[in-house]
Image (cartoon, rainbow, N blue to C red):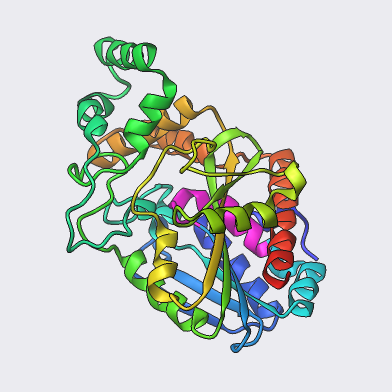
Amino acid sequence: MIGVVEAFAPSYARARVQFLEAAAAAGLAIESHAHPLKGRDGENLAMDVARDGPADADKLLIVSSACHGVEGYCGSGVQVFALHDQAWRDKARAAGVAVLYIHALNPYGFSHIRRVTHENVDLNRNFHDFSQPLPVNEPYREVHPLLLPEEWPPQPDNAQAVAAFIAERGEAAWQAAISRGQHEYPDGLFFGGTEPTWSNRTLRPVLRAHGARASRIAWIDLHTGLGPSGHGERIYAGKDDAAAVARARDWWAGGGATPVTSIYDGSSTSAFLTGLMWTSIYDECPHAEYTGIAMEYGTVPVLEVMQALRAEQWLNLHPEAPADQAAQIKAQMLAAFYTDTDAWKGQIISQARQSLFQAVDGLSG
């Protein structure tokens, strides 16, 4: 059994080694889908997949990490710990639930301490039918000129304009305008793309192959960056379907102790979003009953997260920035999505473990 702290890694390269070693130690076959680019330290990148359970299992639980690159520092730790957790593996096996671990949905962002893919796309805004008109984010058009000034840190006039927007409309409006997703500014924040990304195209056949024989599928997608530090918000992840929302709340709410929130009824810390990744399950496994959550762990206050995202995107647009400034911005970015303390990691694992057990009970109930 691995310790809680040891499950987490200081880099993508090390996290990948720990995941592959944990899967091998558990006797699981590994599928590796190679990414076309190299990592920050020249390492190979891949979306790695391990299945714990028979190929013909009727019930499937998906546990995925690093949809938003840098958030994989947290999500990978959960996956590594789970693969070493014999009590958890015995629980799933006894209930006839196969568990599909998808490690590093966005390995490029994970390695390079970016939230986006190598295409500068927010993967969780990229799942659209691109043959149809894409949603328009009118408020983003207004804030885009404020987000990425020519100089960083921003000059006083920019800081004052941002402060005026927040004072007039509130933090929630600022967060929603930026984070909802947009398809007009390729160099901007939360860009959803104009075509499917590598990660989108790679994920779909994985879901199709592993979900083909399951009649019930659950999904826990691991995220960070919203909410109080260390608190795992269970956010319903699926279509606006009353029965599916009720099912998620029945499975994961813990009788009210661990509420399941939703972007559809305004109960979530997340804004209303479009192009969400888990909509792919309806395309690839239309035969299955689907129930899912995003497990969203808090780190630092949302305005600090937004500031870190602005700085990191500015750095991506200004590769000529001095090395010490680049290092400071990357450190700020990592801290916005990963709290490197034993206490925080303990909170992450305990809540993740609870949600895993709840998912098995729900699938088999």
Q: Seen in the image, is 301 located left or right of residue 317?
A: right
Residue range (magenta): 66-80
Displayed quadrant of residue 297? top right
> In the displayed structure, would residue 342 be above or below residue 60?
above
> In the displayed structure, would residue 90 be above or below residue 8?
below
40 or 252, nearer to the observer? 252
Which is the main secondary structure of the residues drawn in magenta?
helix
188 or 112, nearer to the observer? 188
Displayed quadrant of residue 197? bottom left
Q: Is residue 172 magenta?
A: no
94 or 239, nearer to the observer? 239
- Quick one: quadrant of the N terminus? bottom right
* Residue 110 visible in rendering: yes
Where residue 331 appears, x then y in whole percent?
48, 36
The number of numbered badges drawn on the structure is 0
Q: Seen in the image, is 241 located left or right of residue 345?
A: left
- Quick one: quadrant of the C terminus? bottom right
Residue shown at 30% from the left, 10% from the top: 160
> In the displayed structure, would residue 6 be above or below residue 208?
above
Where residue 214 appears, x then y in whole percent?
56, 81
Displayed quadrant of residue 320? top left
* Residue 37 visible in rendering: no
Where residue 253 appears, x then y in whole percent?
69, 48
Q: Is residue 78 magenta?
A: yes
> In the displayed structure, would residue 205 be above or below residue 176?
below
Residue shown at 69% from the left, 69% from the top: 83
Where residue 289 appears, x then y in whole percent?
54, 71
